[in-house]
Image (spheres, rainbow, N blue to C red):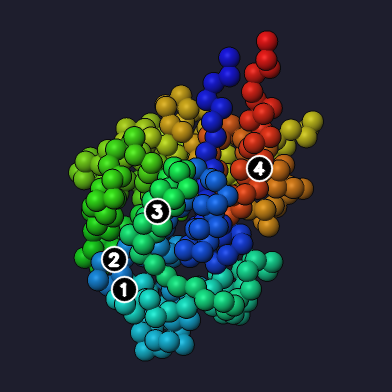
């Protein structure tokens, strides 16, 4: 009997392999590629609006240095939290670039400073996704991430409480609703479950080897784990087979699903093709889902993979 063959594809920052990350066009394109979820990284504006943006900084994806030069902090950076929502809307967004060299981080992606892209709020993005769910008849979920709660807290802001209220207002309240909430900060994710009493599906993101020691603790409040895939991949054995750590197996024993990040067709490392990387992810690592900048490629890979897994007709 084939169990649990349903795998999850999460559009990481939208179709970020093709359009500037986290923009509404990148989300719309990702939506049309039929992933299971679209991801939203969240940082609060000065006036407490959750902005869909990966970093607490603005300078590596926008023209903020040119538009608001006086708002730079002593560390030479521009912070989302120092700007009102209306100020943020005045910025132009582009592909991620290196602030020192002004060069694009991913050389073959959408060209820098071309066309017209803007920042937006969590509400704007939920309305886009829910609107598309209505007009297409599909049911694609949201996968918001609370960014740097400690940083927000130092600025007197309770980002989790604000985000949970908005999610609830839009109908995302329990594990039955099509929403997964993720966070790297274990203290905060536990607080979301215990103190803020969220009944949402929660994923504990992890990035370090040491995190593996705390799986049992994570399982007391979270429903899943989000590790960096390189964390669970050891080297090859003498026969050339990839060896893995016990993380996924242990997580599954504890009833946790595992969604690993980040699968990029233009950052293959030692792998010869994106399909090979995905094959290792699903087949060798036994992942339940992947965050990817290229949702179309992962969805297409999975179609063939699911066919392969399907039981033969009797
Ligand atoms: Ca994220």
**Gap in Å between the C-alphas at discs 1 and 3?**
23 Å
The image shows residue 134 at horizontal and vertical percentages of 40, 48
- Please identify the quadrant where the C terminus is shown: top right
Which residue position is annotated with label 2?
49
Which residue occupies the foreground of this view, 222 or 138? 138
Which residue position is annotated with label 1?
85
Instruction: Mark 4 and mark 3 in contact? Answer it, CB < 8 Å.
Output: no
**Gap in Å between the C-alphas at discs 2 and 4?**
36 Å
Instruction: Mark 1 and mark 3 in contact? Answer it, CB < 8 Å.
Output: no
Crowdedness near tag 4: few (<14), some (14–19) or many (≥20) residues, C-alpha within 10 Å:
few
Element under label 3? helix
**Gap in Å between the C-alphas at discs 4 and 3?**
25 Å
User: Ligand 1 within 8 A of label 4's CB?
Assistant: no
Residue displayed at 29% across by 66% down: 49
Element under label 2? loop
Disc nearer the start of the sequence (1/4): 1
Disc nearer the start of the sequence (2/4): 2
Which residue position is annotated with label 4?
300
Disc nearer the start of the sequence (1/3): 1
The image shows residue 182 at horizontal and vertical percentages of 39, 47
Instruction: Mark 1 and mark 2 in contact? Answer it, CB < 8 Å.
Output: yes
**Gap in Å between the C-alphas at discs 1 and 4?**
38 Å
In the displayed image of the protein, which residue is found farthest to the right? 239
**Gap in Å between the C-alphas at discs 1 and 2?**
7 Å
Residue displayed at 47% across by 63% down: 24
Instruction: Mark 2 and mark 4 in contact? Answer it, CB < 8 Å.
Output: no
In the picture shown, does residue 216 fall above or below 122?
above
The nearer-to-camera label among 3 and 2 is: 3
Residue displayed at 61% across by 35% down: 282
Which residue occupies the foreground of this view, 106 or 239? 106
Instruction: Name the disc covering residue 148, or none.
Output: none
């Amino acid at each position: 009997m084939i169990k649990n063959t349903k795998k999850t594809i999460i559009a990481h920052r939208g179709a970020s392999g093709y359009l500037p990350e986290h923009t509404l066009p990148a989300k719309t394109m990702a939506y049309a590629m039929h992933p299971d979820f679209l991801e939203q990284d969240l940082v609060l504006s000065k006036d407490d609006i959750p902005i869909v943006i990966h970093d607490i900084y603005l300078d590596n994806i926008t023209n903020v240095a040119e538009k608001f030069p006086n708002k730079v902090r002593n560390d030479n950076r521009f912070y989302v939290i120092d700007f009102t929502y209306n100020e943020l809307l005045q910025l132009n967004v582009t592909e991620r670039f290196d602030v020192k060299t002004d060069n694009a981080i991913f050389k073959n992606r959408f060209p820098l400073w071309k066309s017209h892209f803007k920042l937006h709020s969590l509400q704007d993005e939920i309305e886009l996704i829910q609107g598309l769910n209505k007009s297409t008849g599909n049911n694609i979920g949201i996968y918001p991430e609370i960014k740097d709660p400690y940083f927000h807290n130092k600025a007197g802001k309770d980002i989790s409480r604000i985000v949970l209220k908005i999610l609830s207002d839009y109908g995302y309240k329990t594990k039955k609703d099509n929403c997964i909430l993720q966070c790297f900060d274990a203290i905060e994710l536990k607080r979301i479950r215990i103190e803020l009493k969220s009944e949402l599906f929660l994923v504990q993101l992890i990035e370090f080897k040491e995190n593996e020691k705390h799986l049992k603790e994570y399982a007391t409040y979270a429903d899943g784990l989000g590790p960096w895939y390189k964390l669970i991949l050891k080297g090859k054995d003498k026969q050339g087979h990839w060896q893995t750590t016990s993380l996924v197996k242990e997580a599954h024993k504890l009833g946790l699903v595992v969604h690993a990040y980040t699968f990029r067709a233009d950052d293959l490392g030692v792998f010869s093709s994106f399909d090979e990387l995905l094959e290792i992810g699903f087949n060798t690592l036994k992942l339940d889902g992947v965050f990817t900048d290229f949702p179309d490629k992962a969805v297409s890979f999975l179609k063939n993979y699911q066919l392969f897994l399907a039981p033969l007709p009797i």
